[in-house]
């Protein structure tokens, strides 16, 4: 019986990990289509959402995070093309997970990249980002 429970719990963990990965894939697709509002659907729509980065003051709350994104990326060309690479995904419990990843943003005149750390909570059937900590590195590209 224990073996069946282990198999079932591994299947459930894979299902949950896949659901989290789908959120990042959806966010990447929305970003690359110029849809910041769609991108934000991966975040917890709450005043308790936390977004931190080296470039900006911390944003507390979904609305403040949305406004910060819109101010930082006011045009489609400023948004560029975003890609994510997941480095580590840990399910901490049935309703909590952490993810570490790399991001890369390519625009016509420049390229930036960095790392991010996300905390996820599961609300009902949906995983959402409750905390996003991002750092960026500038890459000089020849002109």
Image (cartoon, grey):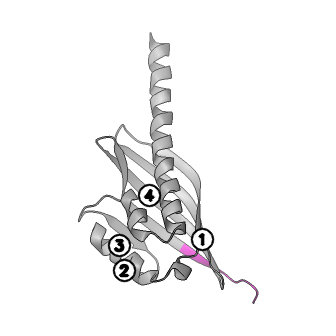
State which mark lies toward you, 4 or 1: 1
User: What number is the disc on residue 118?
Assistant: 4
| Kind of element beneath mark 4 | strand
Residue in the foreground of this view, choosing between 79 and 122? 79
Q: Residue furthest front?
A: 33
| Kind of element beneath mark 1 | strand
Q: Which of disc 4 and disc 3 is earlier in sequence?
A: 3
- Residue neighbourhood size for the residue with mark 1, other residues' Cα within 10 Å, grouped as few (<14), some (14–19), many (≥20): some
Give the extent of the magenta segment. 136-143
State which mark lies toward you, 1 or 2: 1
Residue in the foreground of this view, choosing between 13 and 75? 75
The residue indicated by pointer 1 is 81
Q: Residue furthest left?
A: 47
Q: Is residue 101 magenta?
A: no
Q: Which of disc 2 and disc 4 is earlier in sequence?
A: 2
Q: Residue at x 46, y 22 (%)?
A: 8
Inter-mark Cα distance, 1 to 3? 18 Å
The percent coordinates of residue 129 (x first, y second) are 38, 56
Q: Residue at x 33, y 40 (%)?
A: 125
């Amino acid at each position: 019986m224990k073996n069946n429970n282990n198999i079932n719990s591994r299947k459930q963990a894979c299902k949950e990990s896949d659901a989290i990965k789908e959120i990042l894939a959806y966010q990447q697709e929305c970003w690359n289509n110029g849809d910041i509002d769609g991108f934000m659907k991966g975040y917890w729509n709450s005043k308790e959402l936390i977004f931190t980065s080296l470039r900006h003051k911390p944003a507390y709350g979904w609305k403040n995070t949305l406004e910060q994104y819109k101010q930082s990326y006011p045009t489609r060309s400023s948004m560029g093309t975003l890609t994510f690479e997941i480095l580590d995904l840990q399910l901490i419990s049935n309703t909590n997970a952490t993810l570490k990843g790399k991001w890369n943003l390519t625009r016509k005149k420049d390229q930036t990249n960095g790392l991010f750390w996300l905390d996820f909570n599961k609300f009902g059937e949906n995983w959402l980002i409750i905390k996003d900590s991002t750092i960026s590195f500038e890459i000089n590209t020849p002109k």
